[in-house]
Image (cartoon, rainbow, N blue to C red):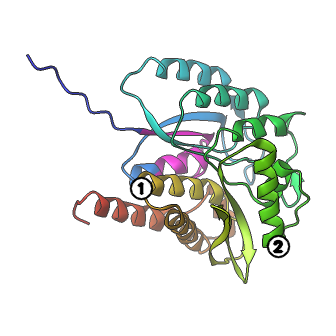
Amino acid sequence: MIGRMIIIKPSVLIAEDFSAVGRLSATAAIAVFSAFGLQTATLPTELLSTQTEGFGTPTTQNTDSFIRRATGHWNGLDDLQFNSGIVGYVGKISTANLLYDYLSGVSLPDLLIDPVLGDQGKMYAGFEPGYLDAIKRLASIATIITPNITELGLLSGERLRVNASDDRIHQAVTDYREATHSKAKVIITGVHRDGGIGCVYVNGDQLKWAGSPLIGGHFYGTGDLFSALLIGYLNFKLDFDTAVQKAVIGVYDAVSLTSRAPQHQRKFGLNLTRSLYNVAKFTLGQTGEEV
């Protein structure tokens, strides 16, 4: 009797905060990966009743206990395998250490870590002493990291301004890699160049730019969306430059639609309609299904 063949379809691991309201962080990532036709497994790093801005003070729940029990369960499953993952906001040293311990043993071909630490030249308030070191340790196992200018400065020890030159950015990336022995691809997000916004990144030894027109205003969740889009495209074996460009375009599509909404509605997150539509068209085209 011939045994039944089990075909395992790899999944994407999502480790981000989970806001119960809106299209942010983990909820947005799940939607993006669904449009790519990818299975997901989610480790919420923190549960929030809403995001932290625009809704008053949210109620929150630490998830360390769940992470321990969930990863312990997953370790015993033969038909759950990961080939990529994204890590966003973590929040606590204990959570960062749990993720480090688990992800170190999974050995993902693509692991994107967004070291959410600060912006506008300052580290966010409320982190425990030693949190920066915990995130540095976690980032050491990434294959891709996506800091903004402030976060790159914190990771590298360089003093970087918002308008840092390409040479300064390249030097900071080099310093970070040398200090941490990291081989990760480094993408610096939210960079302004020639009236546009996008990212600069090092591919090999060359610094490259991928950008889109700048739309004025504050938009929540752009970094989370970029991470999910990039890993989604890399799952389809696109070359790195193309995947970055398509992720930037996807974020622009979402920001463009969101900018048409009244200001008070933007706190619910990005309008993902066009971004998800384009991802779904791409996915169906790659799989040979009718578009």
Q: Which residues are magenta?
A: 11-32
Q: From the top left corner, tell me how far across and down residue 191 is, in percent.
A: 73, 69
In which quadrant will I find the N terminus? top left
Q: From the top left corner, tell me how far across and down residue 86 is, in percent.
A: 58, 44
Does the magenta run of residues contain 291? no
**Helix or strand or loop: what does disc 1 sit on?**
loop
Whether tag 2 and tag 1 are in contact, CB under 8 A, the answer is: no
Q: From the top left corner, tell me how far across and down residue 71 is, in percent.
A: 54, 23
Q: Residues within 10 Å of mark 1 (few under 14, many from 20)?
A: few
Type of amino acid under label 1:
Lys
Q: Residues within 10 Å of mark 2 (few under 14, many from 20)?
A: few
Q: Nearer the viewer, residue 88 or 134?
A: 134
Q: Is residue 141 above or below residue 124?
A: above
For residue 118, say whether it is visible.
no
Q: Nearer the viewer, residue 137 or 193?
A: 137
Which residue is tagged 2? 165
Q: Nearer the viewer, residue 71 or 45?
A: 71
For residue 186, say whether it is visible.
yes
Q: Quadrant of residue 44?
A: top right
Q: Residue at x 67, y 34 (%)?
A: 46
Which residue is tagged 1? 237
Q: Is residue 54 above or below residue 257?
A: above
In which quadrant will I find the C terminus? bottom left
Type of amino acid under label 2:
Ser
